[in-house]
Image (cartoon, coloured by chain):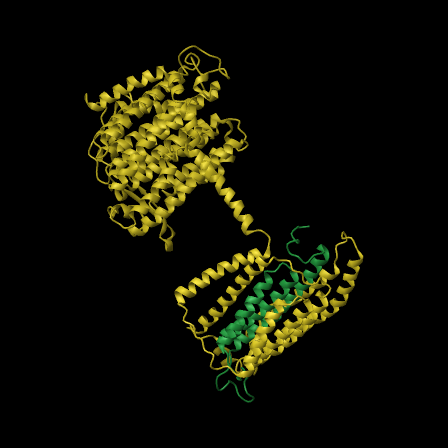
Chain colours: A yellow, B green
Amino acid sequence: MLIAVLSCFILACFAPWLHRLGGRQSGWLLSVLPAALFVYFASLLPEVSQGGQLQFAYPWFPGLQIQLSFLVDGLSLLFALLITGIGFFILVYGGRYLEGHQSLGRFYIFLLGFMGSMLGLVLSDNLISLFVFWELTTVTSFMLIGFNHEQEDARKKAHQGLMVTVMGGLALMTGFIMLGLAAGSFELSTILASGTLTEHSLYLPMLLLILLGTFTKSAQTPFHFWLPNAMAAPTPVSAYLHSATMVKAGVYLMARLHPSLGGSEAWLLILSLFGAVTMVTGIFLASRATGVKRVLAYSTVMALGTLTMLLGLGTEKAALAAVTFLLAHALYKGALFMIAGILDHSAGVKDFRDASGLRASMPITTVVAILASLSLAGIIPLFGFVGKELLLEAVLTASIWQIGLTIATLVANIMVVLVAAIMALKPWFGPQIETPKKPHDPNVALLVGPALLAVLGLVFGLAPALAGNGILTAAASAVYGQPVTIGLSLWHGINLPLMLTISSLIFGLIMYRFWAGWRHITRFMQTAEKFGPEVIYERLMLGMTTFASWQTKTLQNGYLRNYLITTLGTVIIIVGWALLRVNQLELDINFSDIKVHEFAIVALLILSAIIAVMVRSFLAAVAMLGALGFGVALLYVFFSAVDVGITQVLVETITVLLLVLVLYRLPEFRSLSSSANRIRDAIIAGITGLLMTVLILAITSARQLEGISDYFLQNSGPLGHGRNVVNVILVDFRALDTLGEIFVLALVAIGVYAMIHLRTGALPVTNSDRRAAFTFRRSQKEKMKADEQAQKEGEAS
Amino acid sequence: MTTLMAILIGTFYAAAIYMMLRRSVVKLVIGLILLSNAANLLIFTVAGLERGIPPLIPKGQDVIAGAAADPLAQAVILTSIVIGFGVLAFAVVLIHRACEVVQTDDMNEMKGTD
């Protein structure tokens, strides 16, 4: 099973070479794989149709409960057969359709990659690996929609499809994690066996998130807009991904999870409502469109809505209707899309209005098109008829909104008949008109797919038990959660559904007669589309980029103090919140143990810090800093840090010298900021200072663990053979740190030297430059000395 | 004493932040110096203040008999002081050079990339 899925990816890697090897027949060559896989899956049929389940598991990330496990039951086998079966025809068809295209090899890579991903998706037993395959189908779909990447339009539409489905994919992942937690397992077979989850407290959020994923993937209103736009892809891709397989991934997932998540009020309401709305919206838009592929795309939206609605109803009949309709739709829609491709390929026709009377020059294509369209219209004895009867029966016995859903289905059916009539009649009959290319029946590679699919629609219609007993009942049982006992039959007798079918047929044909008028009446849609979901999507994307550029400009504005304010504001809020909520301000305030000389030093330090801030003269500020540094050194000495005190004195001396020597030629302090800014900064600085004070008090009263200092105190004598513990730490226990420190100082010295000596020649040399250079040279000697001294410091300590 | 030190450190931080928020690049340097002093004292205070018991082992002994001040914090601060000085030296020269090239110490005017 693993080999079956992986073989597609492996073949995808070698596709370009095989393509070069196969030349014109490369499509046939590559299609051997899906054919072989189809045979393999078909060989599993007898066992699965008995109600059996096959499981295969390969460990992947055992620690994370992720494994590559596969589950083959009726539902997944139905999909696997569709994917490989239609995939076979698509490869044959695509090889000829894109013959001579310079990136046909690339096309094969993505198509085979998609086939593998889609197989993985429907066969996965593990939620996480299912999700991985789910996203892989999104990525390959993106690549295939944007196949003609030189066209900006194709790129834009590929991007749109990607964004919509990836957004849903994120929601889906969250939903999956909730589902896995709620069910206690990420294995679908375990989840399905453990019964319904509708009573779980996470049920509603999990359901909504998963449905968001499936609705975006399966193009339910209001996300339906990406699917017609995905028609920018080459026609074989549209036939395969965006009609027969990938867009049904959402439907597959809903069907798969129906036993666990279905049956609740929420499930029933959401799915049947969105399904019905999508069904009517899709077919209404299809009836208005004139582009061949657009009409088909919108009618696919309608089919996806119908499937969602049936899954929402969730009765035994609805489950059977869903899988029957799904198979029927895959057969006729795959065929019709390929015929749309033939129209384009052989006659250059992309719009129904540009084609008429082609039956004389394309007789075989005409027959195939009519056969497939009859199935679409649901006319006896085609398989579409069986699906449509079941659909009507399921809707008529629905537990809610019976009348509403029936009317919606009836309206949809009328317009489906219209669409089928357009497809079956418009290009082929009537007066012959000039087409961009000379029309002719295409090569067998292009015809074999649609012809066989259309004929299968007829065969399954005449002998429904062939499909029904083999696979559909097993698939419906997997959806329903219990064995389904109803069989399929072509003739249900003269009943209400039949009446409805006949009346929709009549009304549909009348609508076809007045098709141009209908489009004229409904032209208000052009205005309505300006407020449609696609426009909202574009606004959202635009808003996102506008927001991104706004926040980049605001946050990354290049002003140091704005960065500081942002950072400090965040620190103040987060740390302040933590102090208030977690620590609850248990502060250890104690002024009792202060000695007079310590108090005097601290008071002097505070004073000198304040003066350093206030003074206008740079030299005064430096003097204050010097005083401050020496005061701090004294504090170190008072509190048992002799080495630190000595170092501080040395460094402070050099610092003051450095500042005076280097910076004294700089301009005097000026008042650059407004007083409002000063007050703002003072407030921020004050709050930060207060926060630090409170933080220290909170920390010192909340120390919980013993430090590691004891180790150094105990061992610096025996192990380090030194009596100054601080020194032993620096040169022995943490010697590498000190080495790094020396390295840093060496780098600083090199940097300083370079900045003073290596001047760019391009700069104009002015008198002030020369003066500055002189100053620098003088100060530089001092600095080098200082650096060396500091380096010695590092080494010595 | 910790309380008093906490107030001192808070003042240092406030002064440092205020100076770093100024437009003059020289004041930024002063802010940096204040900030590194504040950070050093913060580590020092949090490790615990002890009077008159430096972590020195008396002659002829292998370990300190009684209590001693935290040697690790002192080692960290030592490193920090020296590194702080290195950063300062580099910053000072860099700033001087920048002022020389762009003829201003106002950071609002130091915006171009060339």
Q: Nearer the viewer, residue A102 or A155?
A: A155
Residue at point 50%, 34% (across, down): A156
Q: Nearer the viewer, residue A315 or A2?
A: A315
In this rendering, would A238 be left or right of A152?
Answer: left
Q: Which quadrant holds the C terminus of chain A?
A: bottom right
Residue A99 visible at all:
yes
Tell me how many marks there are. Answer: 0
Snapshot quadrant of residue B98:
bottom right
**Going by the picture, which residue comes out furthest to the bottom?**
B60
Reply above or below: A731 against A386: below
Reply above or below: A102 against B20: above
In percent of width and height, residue A491 lies at 21, 22
Q: Nearer the viewer, residue A498 or A486?
A: A498
Q: Which quadrant holds the N terminus of chain A?
A: top left
Residue at point 59%, 59% (across, down): A675
**Going by the picture, which residue comes out furthest to the top?**
A431
Snapshot quadrant of residue A424:
top left
In percent of width and height, residue A418 lies at 34, 20
**Going by the picture, which residue comes out furthest to the right?**
A767
**Going by the picture, which residue comes out furthest to the front?**
A675
Residue at point 53%, 31% (across, down): A151
Reply above or below: A704 against B100: below
In percent of width and height, residue A310 lies at 27, 33
In this rendering, would B13 be left or right of A295?
Answer: right
In percent of width and height, residue A408 lies at 29, 28
Residue A736 visible at all:
no
